[in-house]
Amino acid sequence: MGSIGTCLWFDGKAEEAANFYVGLFENSKVGEVARWGEGGPYPAGTALTVQFELEGRSFRGLNGGPDFTFNEAISFELFFDTQEELDATWDALTADGGQESQCGWLKDRFGVSWQLIPNMLPSVLGGPDPAGAARAMQAMLGMQKLDIAALQAAYDG
């Protein structure tokens, strides 16, 4: 069996998106770019597919047109040890038209959904103190970008 990759369908912005994502993550690179020829739905020379790698994971961006769009049914999870790292990534992904959502979810300017999750989240949502876990859950439900200190404070009571 071959390897499994992820194909993301864009409406003309696959190359821009790949370059944006590669700029956000270390150990990332753009690979082969196949371009539309004459007679395609985009001008000749526009990227048809863009292979890129983020932290060792393979992706392919496809400029397939406006027929399909992203939704929250699929999202990428990013995990963070510090609030500073989470904040910086949140700011980068919501810049230039991205949209904040609830409970650590957002959509970037290309419409791709992301979850930015503190590594400590399972310890407060599923910790040994049921009342603390309930408080942490209520705190999280009221947040857009997750706040590590506030989640811990809610758990601690």
Image (cartoon, rainbow, N blue to C red):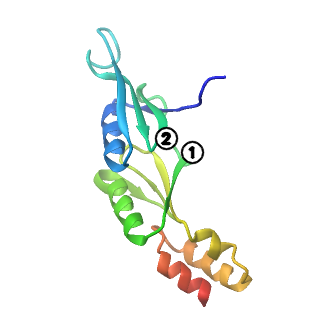
- State whether residue 92 appears in this view: yes
Label 2 crowding class (10 Å Cα cut-off): few <14, some 14-19, many 20+?
Answer: some
Camera-nearest label, 1 or 2: 1
In this picture, is 103 found above or below 64? Answer: below
In this picture, is 33 found above or below 86? Answer: above
Quadrant including the C terminus: bottom right
Residue 36: image quadrant is top left
Task: Name the mark on residue 70.
Answer: 2
Task: Name the mark on residue 44.
Answer: none
Identify residue for label 1. Answer: 74
* Residue at 57% in and 45% down: 74
Report the Cα–Cα distance between label 1 and label 2.
8 Å
Which kind of residue does numbered mark 1 sit on? Ile
- Dot 1 and dot 2 residues touching (CB under 8 Å): yes
In this picture, is 112 found above or below 64? Answer: below
Question: Foreground: 76 or 12?
Answer: 76
Q: Of all residues shown, which one is farthest toward the top?
A: 38
The percent position of residue 21, horizontal first and vertical second, equals 36, 44
- State whether residue 69 appears in this view: no
Is 117 left, or right, of 96 in this rendering?
right
In this picture, is 142 found above or below 25? Answer: below
Question: Foreground: 40 or 56?
Answer: 56
**Helix, strand or loop for disc 1:** loop
The percent position of residue 145, horizontal first and vertical second, equals 45, 67
The percent position of residue 62, horizontal first and vertical second, equals 42, 27
Label 1 crowding class (10 Å Cα cut-off): few <14, some 14-19, many 20+?
Answer: few
Residue 44: image quadrant is top left
**Helix, strand or loop for disc 2:** loop
* Residue at 39% in and 60% down: 90
* Residue at 48% in and 70% down: 146
